[in-house]
Amino acid sequence: MQPLSVPAKIILFGEHAVVYDQPAIAIPVSDLRVVAKFAPPAGNYLKIVGINEHGKQALLYPNADHHNPFSQIVKLTLDFLEKPEPETTIMLESEIPIASGLGSGAALSTIIARALSEFFNQELPLSVLNDIVYEVEKIHHGTPSGIDNTVIVYEKPIVFRRESPLIFIEQIQRPLTFLIADTGEKGLTHISVAAVKERVENHSARRIITAIGDLVEQALVAIQNGDLQGIGQLMVKNHALLQELTVSSQSLDQLVLAAMNAGAYGAKLSGGGRGGNMIALVDDKTLENTRDALYAAGAIKVYKTTLKGS
Ligand code: PMV
């Protein structure tokens, strides 16, 4: 049996604008995962231990703070399953760096809920799981759009729009390869989201939000057609609009420029910004060059992910 695992995610287009009811496109990063394993109980209680990508261990549960995300996901899941706290230990080995726009928070919540439902051998429908993880996402920042939990729970490429039916992107003419480069700076989503909120409330950013939404509609067509040039140009435009929203940073801009100079089709920040990760669209010919250029421009880690064609 495959061990229980959950992917990371990247937002291809539309971050921040998605908080204001514009569409956004996100894909799971299936090669970067958090894996859950059960271990013998440490006593008559539930223990959850996180092991990060550097092998460092942290006790996630029990936790004295009942409003902490780990306490909340355990509570909400057990309430739904109508079960008491199980006597077991769950070890979570994560390859997903935290606070970097790759959805580590939503991935950890998702895997904890799935591990609990597996422990009791009781079904947790995806729509319920998605709702529960969304509740916990609200602890991370007050007004999450819900895109992170949705793409991670369903593990499929999506067009996400608040209050609209979820669209899975089924037809993709050719595989698309993205490099994901980590600036090494922690991007605090709640801070960048708050900065955008201020601009939206005083109306200075409304034009940018709408422009991002329009661009996402075009990006969907380009993705479905496998139009590398078109996708790339839209990524560059999206990055410029995010710069206008003040959520980029010097290191993100540096990596975007380096990727473009190395021959990538397009590049932009991904996720909350002000640190965290950027993404670059490449093909077999431009992959190595772009990867080298990203490291040379200061990336601390470069990952590759491919969105399969269908
Ligand atoms: O959690 P992150 O950093 O990948 O980004 C969240 C994306 C935002 O659009 C900035 C916020 C949201 O809730 O959608």
Image (cartoon, rainbow, N blue to C red):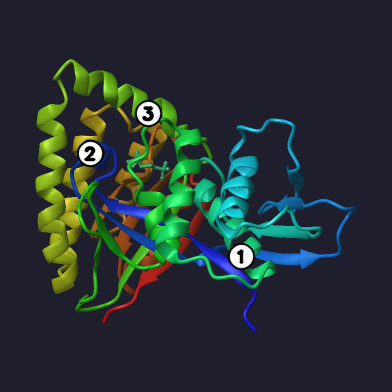
In the image as oriented, which residue stretches furthest toward the right?
Answer: 43
Task: Using a 10 Å C-alpha cutoff, classify the residue at mark 3 as few (fewer than 14 neighbours), some (14 to 19) or many (20 or more).
Answer: many
Q: Tell me residue 65's x, y (percent).
A: 68, 30
Residue 245's disc is none
- Mark yes or no: residue 291 visible: no
Name the residue at 62% across, 80% down.
Answer: 2
Is 78 located above or below residue 287 in the figure? Answer: above
Q: Earlier in the sequence, mark 3 or mark 1?
A: 1
Q: Tell me residue 231's x, y (percent).
A: 18, 60
Q: Which residue is mark 3?
A: 192
Tell me the kind of residue under disc 2: Ala
| Quadrant location, the N terminus | bottom right
Tell me the kind of residue under disc 3: Ser
Is 240 located above or below residue 231 in the figure? Answer: above
SS of the residue under disc 2: helix
Q: Earlier in the sequence, mark 1 or mark 2?
A: 2
Disc 2 residue lies near ligand 1 with CB under 8 A: yes
Q: How far is disc 3 from disc 1 in space, using C-alphas? A: 34 Å
Residue 25 relative to residue 302: left or right: left
Contact between marks 3 and 1 (CB within 8 A): the answer is no
Q: Tell me residue 208's x, y (percent).
A: 14, 33
Name the residue at 41% across, 30% down.
Answer: 142
Tell me the kind of residue under disc 1: Ser
In the image as oriented, which residue stretches furthest toward the top?
Answer: 202
Disc 3 residue lies near ligand 1 with CB under 8 A: yes
Name the residue at 43% across, 65% down.
Answer: 126
SS of the residue under disc 1: helix
Q: Which residue is mark 2?
A: 17
Name the residue at 43% across, 46% down.
Answer: 134
Q: Image quarter for residue 197?
A: top left
Q: Which residue is mark 1?
A: 117
Work out whether residue 254 or residue 157 is closer to the camera in this orientation and state it: 157
